[in-house]
Image (cartoon, grey):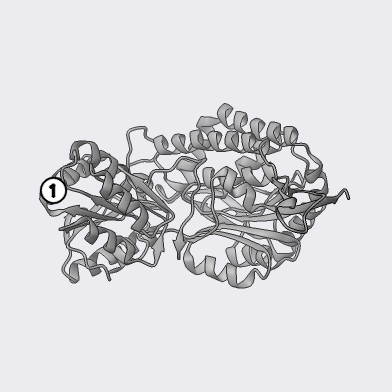
Amino acid sequence: MNKQYYVNGEWKSSEKTTELKSPHTKEVIAHIPQATREEVEQAIEVADYAKKRMAELTAYERAAILEQIAQLFADNRQKAATIISLEAAKPIKYALGEIDRTIETYKFAAEEAKRLTGEMIPMDAAKNGANRFGYTIEQPIGVVGAITPFNFPQNLVAHKVGPAIAAGNTIVLKPASQTPLSALFLAELIDQTALPKGAFNVITGSGRTVGDALVESDKVKMITFTGSPAVGIGIRNKAGLKKVALELGSNAGLIIDKDVDLSQIVPKCVTGAFSNQGQVCISLQRSYVMEELFDEFIEQFAKATKELVIGNPLEETTDVSAMIHPGEQDRAVDWVQEAVQNGAEIVTGGKIENGVFMPTILTNVSPTLKVSCQEVFAPIVVVNRISSVEEGIEAINDSNFGLQAGIFTNDIQTAFKASKQLEVGGVLINDIPTYRVDQMPYGGVKESGTGKEGLKYAIHEMTETKLVVWNHN
């Protein structure tokens, strides 16, 4: 199946294509265009030309378009989810869940499009402000370059496309090389809406070609990127004065205090650690369990992990399937072996069986090892014992990342202390750090990035605040 990219409401071909293979079956499922630098620049020109028409849309019109997108996803829910499972090996039940969230994300964007307001400025609060009337307005920034990852190929795209449309911007989208089919399916849906032609464009190809062209173009006014810290820092260094929002991942930590009900906690931890093969920015990677509950937690956690169904992502019962690329599975094995060589113990997993890296629990892991201090992005979770919550907080903070963290505790003072002392963008009390709903502010500190996602917050990132002052003296 030869695919085309989407620019100015038209489907276009490139001279060069590349094979797209299923992570699960390793079969070729499509041939994907590899755009040239010139083709990317043409897409940017188109988006730049369309920005005037896009900015003229009323809030009502922008909201109506976003509602159309949401409805089209609802109408094509199974097809959209199947595409995700085919190209990303995400188990179908999680892919369907992603589409449900995608629908909700576009609906939130539609609602926020109608709430994009400035504020009144009390000019006469200043000594020289008498007889003046001031207010701000939020105006579209222009062309937004969106660079998205493979792990949520519809919903993380929605977190960039939805706010951009709500704010009145135009978009050039560069999807991850492994998951372009979802982005091209989005283009098919958007083509059926009232969005002005040229306001949304999808360019497939290498990150070096497409990404660099977006980052270096003077016509692109903002880059919104989700991916690795190395690439994100490179974007930041090249972007000049354009706005940049970066979501760069984490090694999310969880503290389990004494006197909590493990029967309620363990199922959440299994989901947080192993859903989507651990390929989630806020996947539960580090768990710190009070020594009073440690042995019981390990026993329950290992038992529940071994009950996960491994196999074909298109089967409704499958919990875990192949990671995005064989090389990533080999890396996971190498990281586990390094940990074992340095004193860690494997409770379960740690190897590849039938083409799938098995869900893995490690204990007694040094904080300096890759499985602990780097983003593992695999179904691997570290579980270490602690003697106090303060020790757990210190361990979570001992990281270059800081996206989200969680704590289970029955002590309200402990919860308040953790909420203030954890050095992360979001603290989840009595929940796993993997929890996210799409309207909440979402973003990290340290090497986890800059800026906030979540519709209301992302929209404000994608606008310019203009001050207007009337002198009526």
Question: Left or right of 39: which side holds 238?
Answer: left
Residue 28 location (% of width, % of height) = 50, 50
Q: Amino acid at mark 1?
A: Leu
Q: Residue at x 15, y 49 (%)?
A: 298
Q: Outermost residue, top direction?
A: 75
Q: Residue at x 50, y 36 (%)?
A: 99
Residue 142 location (% of width, % of height) = 74, 54
Q: Quadrant of the N terminus?
A: top right
Question: Secondary structure under badge 1?
Answer: helix
Q: Outermost residue, front direction?
A: 127
The residue that disc 1 covers is 293
Q: Determine which quarter of the picture holds residue 76.
A: top right
Q: Residue at x 70, y 65 (%)?
A: 37
Q: Is residue 99 above or below residue 140?
A: above
* Total numbered labels placed on residues in the image: 1
Q: Is residue 50 visible?
A: yes
Instruction: Identify which residue, 231 or 419, lies in the foreground.
Output: 419
Residue 272 location (% of width, % of height) = 33, 46
Instruction: Identify which residue, 73 or 260, lies in the foreground.
Output: 260
Q: Is residue 115 above or below residue 433?
A: above
Question: Left or right of 160: which side holds 48?
Answer: right
Question: Left or right of 123: which side holds 21?
Answer: left
